[in-house]
Amino acid sequence: MEITRIQIILIMGLMAFAMRALPQLFFAGQKFPEAWDRWLRYVSYGLICSIISVTLFMSAARVETAAAPRRALALIVAIVIARKTKSAVTGMIAGALLVLILSWLMI
Amino acid sequence: MSFAARFSQGMKAAIPVWIAFVPSSIAWGIAAERHGLSLDEVILMSAWVYSGPAQFAVLAPLAENKSALQVLIAGFLMNLRFLPMSTALAPFFRGVRRLPLLMSSHVVSASSFIVPYLQFQKERGGVAADRQAAHGAGGYGNLAFFLGVGVTAFIVWVAGSGAGFGVALGFTSDFDEALRFILPGYFAGLLVVEMKGWAMPLICLGSLLGALPGALASPGWGWLVMAIVVATLVWGVEQWKLRASRSS
């Protein structure tokens, strides 16, 4: 039996939904032991930083080496400004402007 | 704080996410159209799968009519990341009934995990000192904030995919760099504002650097494994230090 494209999309969505919903069924509102709670928190921070890194420096399973220096510089500037101003949006805007200017200057 | 007020608080926090989702969803819609997917399939995939990286990853094998198993495995590996994200959010939804939880979980994505998670962590730090905040940060309050981020970002993603199918890119390539920076820049800002102690900066730096070789080794989940390894190593060292200080 051949599976149609619509059926593949439906199964794929069902699998994604299972990944999202299962933890909510089993762990919603649960308080984990202190050590496990900390582990989960640390894994979350690790995941966030990995997402930042991959989103910023990679494209189609390759590191974008030409753009990496200006993006890294913009990330550092965004971090410093966000920390100083206590505002993530201000840091993000400063970093985005910097990376834009650097890309126009072809740095 | 009422459910609606908390929802709108989440919406405001999601504005940078919407800005970043517009070009990427339109780009996906255009790519899908070029790969021969119909408008129905584009909308269905964006709304039902709702996972940018997985949608891009399966586009070529889907268009080339590769085996269904191959497409499903690629999608499954890309979507494995939702498991730890959803697990980390789950403890904040105390007292929420199963049906709303199940329905809400559909909008778990990297953005709708990061923004609410960091907000809940910040509020958890303040809860002990402020009982009023404790009321606002209850299970349903947290769910409202999460939905404020998740549902609105979801709508932008699906609408953008549909628009991209028929419309040419609305942004010139001159602005690509800035648009691409918005999400990671915003996430880094949210994280660094809350940063304290020695463990968190170490995990962040380790994961930031380790994600690249991890993703090169395995684009689907190498970065995820690296994040778990780095976090577990730092957690292990901290556990060891805690035990040592207790026994001395």
Image: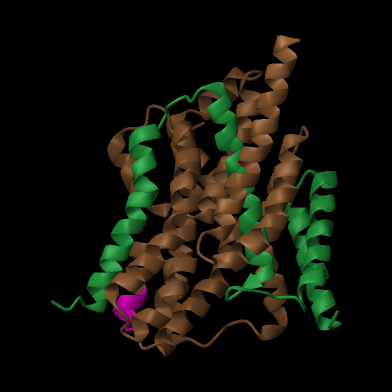
Chain colours: A green, B brown
Q: Farthest residue toward the left? A: A1
Q: In this view, does B244 lie to the left or right of B167?
A: right
Q: Is B225 within the magenta?
A: no
Query: Which is nearer the eye, B52 or B163?
Result: B52
Q: Is residue B127 above or below residue B182?
A: above
Q: In this view, does A51 lie above or below A86?
A: below
Q: What stretch is highlighted in magenta?
A: B37-42
Query: Which is nearer the eye, B179 or A2?
Result: A2
Q: Where is residue B209 in the image (x, y as percent from the top left)?
A: 72, 57
Q: Residue at x 47, y 83 (%)?
A: B31
Q: Residue at x 59, y 58 (%)?
A: B223
Quadrant position of residue A98: bottom right
Q: Is residue B135 above or below residue B192?
A: above
Q: In this view, does A19 lie to the left or right of A49?
A: left
Q: Which residue is drawn at 59% across and 36% down?
A: A41
Q: In this view, does B224 lie above or below B239?
A: below
Q: Position of residue B182 (x, y in %)?
A: 67, 64
Residue A28 visible in rendering? yes
State whether the magenta stretch is mostly helix, strand or loop.
helix
Residue B193 visible in rendering? no
Quadrant position of residue A84: top right
Q: Farthest residue toward the top? A: B248
Query: Which is nearer the eye, B54 or B177?
Result: B54
Quadrant of the drawing holding the C terminus of chain B: top right
Q: Where is residue B180 in the image (x, y as percent from the top left)?
A: 66, 70
Quadrant position of residue B174: bottom right
Q: Position of residue A88 (x, y in %)?
A: 73, 50
Q: Is residue B226 left or right of residue B204?
A: left
Q: Residue at x 83, y 76 (%)?
A: A101
